[in-house]
Structure formats: structure tokens, C-alpha cells
Image: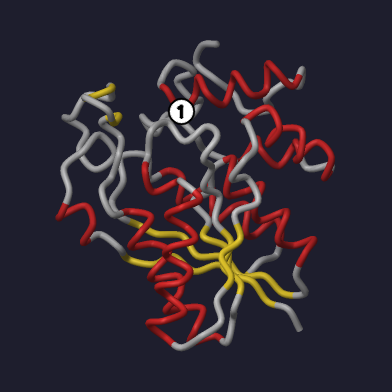
Amino acid sequence: MKKALVVFSGGQDSSTCLVWAMRKFDAVEAITFDYDQRHRVEIVCAKKIAKIKKIKHTVIDARFLHDMTKNALTRKNVKIEWKNALPSTFVPGRNLMFLSLAGIIAYQKGIQNIVAGVCQTDFSGYPDCRDAFIQSLQKTLNLAMEYDFTMHTPLMFLTKKETVELMRDFGEIDLLRHTHTCYYGKRPACGACPACELRLKGFREAGIADPLPYEKV
């Protein structure tokens, strides 16, 4: 039986990856990380989607990351903006930690496939969303645990438009109404932060209505 563990934030990309994994593997589990994030409503969304899809879902306490870092996703008093080469929403080490922890959990469960929604095409400048990082980490995890992990990143080279179209092709566009994207943690979503703008741009270019409600668009 081919099993997979999906790193699942409850957002558009990870939800697309969850649906993708359910079509590719015989058994799928999902993990969500609670790092006391500014937009922690995404955890509620992740739980709801996992329940809808009848997927075993675990929330992992990773609040140490909040204590270690100061940025716009871990501190409400930090302005969401571009700062030098990186946006202020960059959480240093987040994907490194989350994917490493996913490897530890997968190893214990006898799971070799780890699925993540990182994307190099629309990566907003985050260095830990690049394919080179994923390939490097896969090798590191394999060496560290003497285990044959495969890191799957089905959205790596897709634009947001293509990600929306993928969910359309899966017949799962309506599932995206339960996802969360807004950096401010607003529901309805603000429609103006960089994450909302990128999401809306993808739907607009795909010619598909976003089922998620917004304050303004």
C-alpha cells in the first residue's frame, strides 16, 4: 500500500496537494503545525477540510517557532510589507522545520512519501519554497534516517492560475471555500494583502470565481 503524509496548512495550495495525494496514493494522512501564527484560523480550516475529506489529521505543537522568530506571521505588530529582498512574512526556518518534523513523523508511521504545497513559480521570494531546497532536504532526511523518503511538490512549477485549474480538473473548486489564505487571518478574507492578491490573480486569470468570501476585491 502506497501511503503519503501531507503537510497541510489549510490553505489553497496545501488543499490542492491533499486532493492530489488522495488520487495518487492508497492512504493519506495530514499534519498541520500550530506555531501560534497570526492567521491561526487556518488551523480551523485545516481541521474542517480534513473532516470533509475523511482524512486522518494531526495538529503538531510547533509554538517554539513563534518564540524563536519575529516576523509578520508570528507578530501582529510587524507590518506586512516587502523588506529588502524578502517580505516581512518570511518565517526563517519554517519549511525546514516543518518538513523535517514531517520526516520524523512519517518515519514512525512507515510512510515514505511526503507531500508539500511549496511553489517556486509564485514563491513570493521565500527561499525555502524552491526546488533546490526540497531536493537538498530530501537527500538530508534520507541520510539522517537511512530511509527512502520522496518529497512530492506537485505545485512546484505551476502558476496560481494553473493551480486553480488543477482543482477545477479535480472537480474540487468548491472545497476552496473552506481554505484560508489571508495573512491577516480575516474571514471574510481582506482581499488586499499579498497572499489574497496572489490568490485572486490566479482565479481571475483562470476565469473561475473564487468561492472564498472577501471583504473587498
Which of the 4 image quarters holds residue 5? bottom right
Q: Position of residue 67 (x, y in %)?
A: 15, 55
Residue shown at 42% from the left, 23% from the top: 194
Residue shown at 51% from the left, 40% from the top: 120
> Which residue is identified by label 1?
195
Residue 158 horizontal side relative to residue 128, left or right: right
Q: Is residue 105 above or below residue 17?
A: below
Most extreme residue toward the top, as rendered?
217
Q: Position of residue 157 (x, y in %)?
A: 62, 41
Which of the 4 image quarters holds residue 143? bottom left
Q: Position of residue 95 (x, y in %)?
A: 38, 55
- Location of the N terminus by quadrant is bottom right
Mark 1 element type: helix
Residue 62 horizontal side relative to residue 120, left or right: left
Residue 164 horizontal side relative to residue 83, left or right: right
Neighbours of disc 1 within 10 Å: few (<14), some (14-19), many (20+)? some
